[in-house]
Image (cartoon, rainbow, N blue to C red):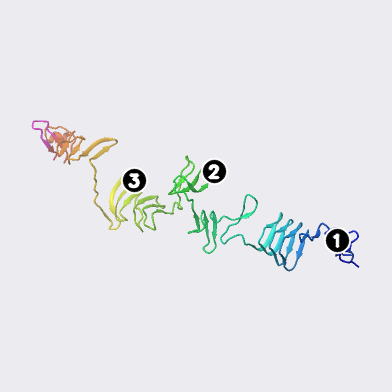
């Protein structure tokens, strides 16, 4: 008979006695021990089909396997892994192997937290930097109140500050930086391409469908101030919300510049406003309308309302025709007074 307080021959201090497979009284220290001073039960492996509850520590040098719930107000340590349906701990959960649970409750984390491992290898949160809005399925970076699916806030109102940067796979051939009021290429020698799905996709720059700048993918036409529902009908169009507009169309070896109203399907007046209007051919001045309303042809310094330099000289109409002029052409006689005549 064993009596409490009496020594056990062959026993180990803090060892727990049990009946082994042969029906003999046995112990397995230090794999299964109880420390009466600290009231800590230590086992290498814990397997329970019900619930494990402790007001202090739960420590297992091996693993803890529970089909129900593991609850502890202190530290849960399982060096070989922890497998259970639900884990609830007000302290720390520590394992050097695998933590497997259908539900893990950490009262230190707040709603919307995105847990991560910090520099001290502890589970941590930083809602001001990284937040998940489960109700609206939104992610906040740099803030805890995301207004859209991905809400990135820098906090810096400096154009050179990158809020987000997206690089190519080797970080050298190019990348796009999104900063305060700018989208730019981060590699100086690389282009910045905005591709809406060309050749058939359209690119609209402007609020809603106002088409302040509109690029039609089908013909690579560019329209400025097109208005909603209007596409540019030429390679470059500056429009009044889809009404009268200035259209430039290089075609057939020529460049056509016209004013056209696509709403009324009619040509519109063209108003040129400048201090002077000069016409050049291949970089050489050929005509001018100066600020005093004087036209100069063959000169850029007209001194009369119509100043023409370079008319051919012929004595009469027959000589002008013989010289190659046709009906309606001008020539002068070279006499005094020097008359200007029209070939007939």
At 74% from the left and 59% from the top, the residue drawn is 59
Where does the magenta region start and end?
Answer: 332-340
Which labelled disc corresponds to residue 27?
1
Q: Is mark 3 on a helix, strand or loop?
A: strand
Mark 1 Cα-neighbour bin, 10 Å: few <14, some 14–19, many ≥20:
some
Mark 3 Cα-neighbour bin, 10 Å: few <14, some 14–19, many ≥20:
few
* Cα distance between the residues tagged 1 and 3: 98 Å
Q: Where does label 2 land, which residue? A: 171
- Residue 342 vs residue 200: left or right? left
- Residue 96 vs residue 325: left or right? right
Q: Is mark 1 on a helix, strand or loop?
A: loop
Q: Where is residue 19 in the image (x, y as percent from the top left)?
A: 86, 65
The answer to whether the residues at label 1 and label 3 have Cβ atoms under 8 Å apart is no
Ranked by sequence position, the earlier of labels 3 and 2 is: 2
- Residue 80 vs residue 332: left or right? right
Q: Where does label 3 land, which residue? A: 250
- Residue 106 vs residue 273: left or right? right
Q: Position of residue 101 (x, y in %)?
A: 68, 62
- Indicate which label's residue lies in the foreground, 1 or 3: 1
Ranked by sequence position, the earlier of labels 1 and 3 is: 1
At 76% from the left and 64% from the top, the residue drawn is 47
- On screen, 230 above or below 193? below
């Amino acid at each position: 008979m064993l009596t409490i307080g009496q020594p056990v021959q062959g026993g180990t201090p803090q060892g727990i006695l049990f009946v082994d497979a042969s029906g003999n009284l046995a112990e397995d220290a230090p794999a299964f021990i109880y420390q009466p001073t600290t009231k800590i039960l230590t086992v290498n492996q814990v397997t329970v089909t019900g619930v494990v509850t402790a007001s202090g520590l739960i420590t297992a040098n091996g693993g803890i396997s529970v089909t129900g719930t593991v609850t502890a107000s202190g530290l849960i340590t399982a060096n070989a892994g922890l497998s259970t349906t639900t884990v609830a701990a007000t302290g720390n959960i520590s394992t050097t192997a695998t933590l497997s649970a259908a539900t893990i409750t950490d009262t230190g984390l707040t709603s919307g937290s995105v847990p991560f491992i910090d520099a001290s290898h502890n589970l941590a949160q930083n809602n001001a930097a990284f937040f998940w809005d489960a109700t609206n399925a939104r992610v906040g970076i740099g803030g805890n109140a995301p207004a859209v699916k991905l809400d990135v806030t820098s906090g810096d109102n400096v154009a050179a500050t990158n809020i987000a940067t997206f690089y190519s796979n080797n970080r050298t051939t190019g990348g796009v930086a999104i900063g305060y009021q700018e989208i730019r290429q981060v590699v100086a020698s690389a282009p910045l391409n905005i591709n809406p799905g060309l050749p058939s996709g359209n690119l609209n720059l402007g609020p809603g469908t106002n088409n302040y700048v509109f690029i039609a993918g089908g013909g690579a036409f560019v329209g400025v101030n097109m208005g909603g529902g209007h596409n540019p009908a030429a390679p470059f169009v500056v429009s009044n919300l889809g009404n009268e507009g200035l259209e430039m169309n290089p075609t057939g070896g020529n460049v056509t510049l016209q004013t056209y109203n696509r709403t009324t399907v009619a040509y519109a007046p063209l108003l040129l406003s400048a201090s002077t209007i000069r016409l050049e051919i291949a970089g050489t001045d050929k005509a001018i309308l100066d600020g005093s309303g004087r036209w100069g042809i063959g000169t850029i310094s007209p001194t009369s309302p119509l100043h023409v330099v370079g008319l051919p000289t012929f004595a009469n109409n027959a000589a002008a025709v013989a010289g190659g002029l046709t009906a309606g052409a001008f020539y002068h006689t070279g006499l005094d007074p020097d008359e200007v005549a029209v070939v007939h």
